[in-house]
Image (cartoon, coloured by chain):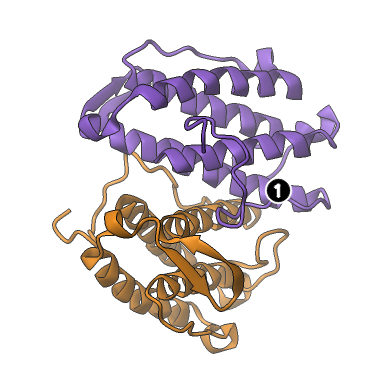
Chain colours: A purple, B orange
Amino acid sequence: MIKFFEYNWQVRDEWFDWCNQLTIKELLKDHRGGVGNILYTLFHIIDVEYSWIRGIQGKEDIVFQFADYNTLEKVKSLSDKSRNEIAEFLKITNFGDLKEQLVSVSWDEDKYTFDDILHHIITHEIHHIGQLSVWARELELSPVPANFIGREFTRGFINENE
Amino acid sequence: MIKFFEYNWQVRDEWFDWCNQLTIKELLKDHRGGVGNILYTLFHIIDVEYSWIRGIQGKEDIVFQFADYNTLEKVKSLSDKSRNEIAEFLKITNFGDLKEQLVSVSWDEDKYTFDDILHHIITHEIHHIGQLSVWARELELSPVPANFIGREFTRGFINENE
């Protein structure tokens, strides 16, 4: 499970770097499908991940407003900050014992297991990144490569020695 | 890992159902990004999954030609057939012992571990499905929902009692 988080976080950072070539107008340009624009997609991925992880932790949800994060720098900073917290949590948590533990969250009537929530966070990010790759081509740009293999994992967010 | 395969295969089948509303012309219509059209994307996902699984098994690659699978029915049938084989294999294999085993394949100079290849197959499919979701909107259609949680896993491909 950890490897998928490492993958998602590295790909996300590569998208942040990629975004540096765009103006704020291009980052906020409306595209068909998904959640509508590049910057909001990155914000949404972070927001969803952080909310679910706080849910797993039994902590109250913190609702972020996109209006407060309307630049690339602010979204990147939110990503870094929330990720540090999440990496710390994933590092010290033994999910083997907790896999089937049920979690209630404020924004959903149903309960889900820790394990399913982790699966959800992972698939959610990859799905939205797939959408960014199409929008990149609409802007006549090459998307960030998405391959899992062949990729050098340059930074271990969770396993520092990786 | 198995849960991600179950998820991908169920979502894939939902896309096959979804595709029934399209003509073959729409299925083959050129879209920006990804591998270019809906039917070829589904074919490509299956082809990549099957090739890597055969690689893990130490079997020779079977190269499928899209020209031989140029209808929805043929691609669906390829999906069903290869999946039955893969599900059988995943069912009887204890990946815990094999995770770090290195695999060589004919189409790549580098070697990868079993574990990384399984991660690759999983992220590869989710990424391409994200692209289909954008193209669906270009056709003014709602895409297949991608959520992992809230989804009922109606068929256990690998764990039959799931």
Please, what is the three-letter code of the amino acid marked with disc 1?
Val
Label 1, on which residue? Answer: A144
Judge whether residue B114 can be spotted in this image: yes
Identity of the residue furthest to the bottom in this view: B68
Residue A23 in the image: state x and y as whole percent.
86, 31
Question: Would you say A146 lies left or right of B21 here?
Answer: right
Judge whether residue A29 can be spotted in this image: no
Question: Would you say B89 lies left or right of B141 here?
Answer: left
A98 to A130, vertically: above or below: above
Residue A146 in the image: state x and y as whole percent.
62, 52
* Chain name for mark 1: A
Q: Residue at x 68, y 50 (%)?
A: A133
Q: Residue at x 52, y 74 (%)?
A: B105
Question: Would you say B45 lies left or right of A118 here?
Answer: right
Quarter holding residue A56: top left
Q: Residue at x 70, y 30 (%)?
A: A39
Determine the secondary structure under disc 1.
Answer: loop
Judge the density around disc 1: few (<14), some (14-19), many (≥20) Cα neighbours within 10 Å.
some
